[in-house]
Structure formats: C-alpha cells, structure tokens
Image: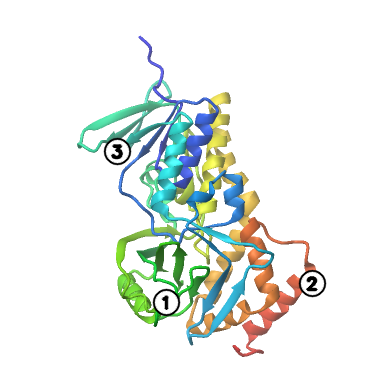
C-alpha cells in the first residue's frame, strides 16, 4: 500500500497570498491543493501599484480604473491634491473578480482547487499532516500533505493553532460598501473616477481614515478603526451623504479585521508557514495589503520549496526574514507615523498640511509605486525632516 501523502503542500486560503503561493509551487511541479471557502471577500480599497502588476504578471483587464492622484481631506474639510508625476498611476481592482482570477490561474498551473472550510491540522506519525475540512455539504474530509501554507486571513485559525504568539496582533476593523459609480457630472456628487479620496476626520474614524476609491463602474467607500465601539456602518452612511453618494445603489457590504503589524514568527518549526494577512503583512498607516500579500505568498512558496527539497524545518523561517529585510524598515516608519499623526484631529490637521509639500508628495509616490524607501535624495529627506519637526513642535500652523 502506498502511504505517501496526497499532496506536497496544502494552501489554506485562496486570497492573493494563497493563490500566488499555490501558483508558484504548481509551476515548480509540486502537488498543490488550494483549500478555500466560497463567498469570502475582504473589504479592501483595491489599490495595487505598477510594481505588483509587473512582478506578479497581472493582466490589464483586471484593472477597473487607473488612478492618477489622491485627494487628502482634513478634519476641517481642507483638501490637498497629490498628483502622481511622470504619467504614473495606481491600478484599482475589484477583489471579487481579482481574487477569483488568481485562484483560477493557480488551477491552470496545476493546483487542485478544493472548496470547503478548514477545521484543523493533525500531525501524523510518519511526519506528514492531515488537513481536515468541511465541504459545502457539511461532510468532513481530509487532505494528507507534507507541508501547509496558512493564508486564511487576519483571524487565521491556522496561525492560532500552529504558530506561537499568533493571537497577539492588534487589528483595525475595516468595513466598506461597494456601490454603483455615479455618472460623470452628476449634480451634488463629490467624486472623481481618476482620484482616490482619503479622509482623515475623527467624525468618520477616530484613529485611522475613511476612503472613497473608484473601481470603474463601482466605488468602494469605507472606513477603518481599532475602536470596537465605533459604528463603521454609521460612518460610511455619513460619508456617503457628505459626498452625495447616498443615492447610489449598494451592491454589497463587507467587513473584516486587518492586522496592524507582522507577526514575530510565521512558521511552526515543523511544516507550516503563514502568508498574507495571516502573517500580519498589512502596511501600517496606509492599510495597504494586496502587494504585500502577493509577495508574502511568493516568499512562503519559496520557503516551502526549500523545505520540500532539504527536509529541514529551519528553512521555513526564511519567508519572514526575507520579507522583513526588504520591507521591515518601511513598516517601522509607517507604524510610527500612524501612532503619532492619527492620534487626534489636531495632529491629523497638521499631517494633511504636510501632504501638500511637493517633496513629501514625490517621495511618498516613489516609495508606494516602487515599494522601497528612496535613498538617493538626501536633501529632500532633510527638508522633510525639518518640516516634520516644525509641525511636531507647532512652529508652523496648518495652512
């Protein structure tokens, strides 16, 4: 009798992280099962930088809009425009279509799609593990595998079951409504199909921000906060009224927690590694997660491939080490920014004033679009530091 596992890896969760991990491993000839439950869509503004489009081979038809700038709105309703220079843009996707396309691509590369809800993981005597799940009919099933990638979201059950300290991550709770886009020139509507609006106002979020993001024929309008007692739905209702979007048809509503910092450990020291929101890779301050989820899935796949080749669990830690080497400093800087500037409306007012500075705008877009800190412009960084210091000490007033 052949007692070998059915799969080399079972990927639990079919969002961007899980789908990319499944795709990469299937392309390497690995036996991959992608376990995902149906009907799960994460609340998300849907912004992806050109680097993600190029690096992960994303086709143009997934882009519902190309945004050429942002408008930052202060608590006193001052608006600061941040255009993207040199014909740059941010791609906007609809997560319902985007995630499914990624899952289908994984299947086309050879991954087996399994629809069901993860229950638990059992270690077997031969070193393999059994992933138990319940299918759409409520029947319990088992997938035997050599390794596991946990990409099942911020409240990851895989992480809590397998990785020490996984339950200690703080969260922002996000909620958005996907609505029909208004027609161009609609009276009383404050909206542009080429612009992302980011609203820093305690009325809409006491400690984070609200947004209005274009998706072509639809719009994502949402809010995030770590305050559990704050009414997310009430906030979105108020923002829709303020922007004139309250008359647009509501197509769907979604809510979910979003992690605020990467977990200190992503693997269990045996055969499991985490990716995406399960690993906590959402950028502080901005809440951006799609690019980091895609990258986290790729790094998890790389670590699992090394594990399958050499059999040493220690190599699983490479997924986190490689991610933090590339992006840890960015996450650290954004975390400090969020903790200080989002603290009150008074500070948010000053923060929005800083967003009007051309040095700030240029370096912000370069860092976002290319996913790296810009080191080649020391004088610009010095000017930003001095201006930041002036705002911190109150030497300048919001303009």
The quadrant of the picture occupied by the N terminus is: top left
Residue 297 in view, yes or no: yes
> Residue 392, how many percent across, how many down?
62, 82
Estimate the spatial distance between the alpha carbons at disc 2 and disc 3, rounded to whole Å.
54 Å
| Cβ–Cβ under 8 Å for marks 2 and 3 | no
Compare residues 282 and 158 and report the one nearer the observer.
282
Compare residues 20 and 95 and report the one nearer the observer.
95
Query: Mark 3 packing: few (<14 Cα in 10 Å), some, or many (20+)?
Result: many
In the displayed structure, 32 sits above or below 96; it is above
Which badge, 1 or 3, comes first in the chain's sequence?
Answer: 3
Estimate the spatial distance between the alpha carbons at disc 2 and disc 1, rounded to whole Å.
34 Å
Query: To which residue does mark 2 refer?
Result: 379
Circle 3: element type: loop
The quadrant of the picture occupied by the C terminus is: bottom right
Circle 2: element type: helix
> Residue 378, how many percent across, how many down?
79, 68
Q: Residue furthest top?
A: 1
Query: To which residue does mark 1 refer?
Result: 206
Estimate the spatial distance between the alpha carbons at disc 1 and disc 3, rounded to whole Å.
37 Å
Query: To which residue does mark 3 refer?
Result: 116
Residue 148 in view, yes or no: no
Query: Mark 1 packing: few (<14 Cα in 10 Å), some, or many (20+)?
Result: some
Which residue is found at the position 48% from the left and 68% from the top? 193
């Amino acid at each position: 009798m052949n007692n070998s596992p059915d799969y080399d890896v079972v990927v639990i969760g079919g969002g961007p992280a899980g789908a990319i991990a499944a795709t990469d491993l299937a392309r390497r000839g690995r036996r991959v099962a992608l376990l995902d439950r149906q009907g799960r869509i994460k609340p998300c503004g849907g912004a992806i930088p050109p680097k993600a489009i190029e690096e992960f081979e994303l086709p143009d038809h997934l882009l519902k809009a190309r945004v050429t700038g942002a408008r930052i709105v202060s608590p006193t309703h001052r608006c600061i425009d941040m255009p993207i220079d040199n014909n740059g843009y941010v791609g906007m996707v609809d997560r319902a279509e985007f995630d499914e396309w990624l899952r289908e691509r994984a299947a086309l590369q050879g991954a087996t799609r399994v629809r069901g809800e993860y229950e638990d993981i059992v270690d077997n005597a031969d070193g393999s593990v059994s992933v138990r799940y319940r299918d759409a009919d409520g029947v319990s099933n088992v997938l035997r595998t050599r390794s596991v990638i946990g990409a099942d979201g911020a409240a990851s059950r895989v992480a809590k079951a397998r990785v020490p300290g996984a339950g200690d991550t703080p969260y922002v709770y996000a909620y958005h409504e996907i609505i029909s886009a208004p027609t161009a020139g609609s009276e009383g509507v404050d909206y542009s199909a080429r612009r992302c609006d980011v609203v820093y106002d305690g009325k809409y979020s006491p400690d984070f921000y609200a947004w209005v993001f274009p998706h072509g024929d639809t719009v994502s309008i949402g809010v995030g906060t770590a305050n559990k007692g704050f009414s997310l739905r009430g906030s979105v209702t108020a923002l829709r009224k303020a922007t004139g979007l309250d008359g647009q048809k509501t197509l769907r509503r979604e809510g979910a927690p979003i992690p605020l910092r990467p977990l200190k450990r992503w693997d269990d020291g045996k055969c499991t590694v985490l990716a995406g929101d399960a690993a906590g890779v959402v950028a502080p301050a901005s809440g951006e997660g799609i690019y980091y989820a895609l990258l986290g899935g790729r790094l998890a796949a790389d670590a699992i491939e090394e594990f399958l080749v050499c059999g040493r669990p220690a190599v699983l830690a490479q997924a986190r080490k490689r991610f933090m080497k590339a992006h840890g400093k960015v996450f650290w800087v954004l975390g400090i920014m969020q903790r200080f500037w989002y603290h009150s409306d008074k500070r948010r007012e000053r923060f929005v004033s800083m967003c009007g500075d051309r040095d700030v705008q240029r370096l912000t877009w370069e860092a976002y679009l290319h996913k790296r800190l810009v080191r080649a412009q020391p004088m610009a960084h010095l000017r930003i530091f001095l201006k930041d210091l002036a705002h911190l000490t109150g030497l300048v007033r919001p303009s």
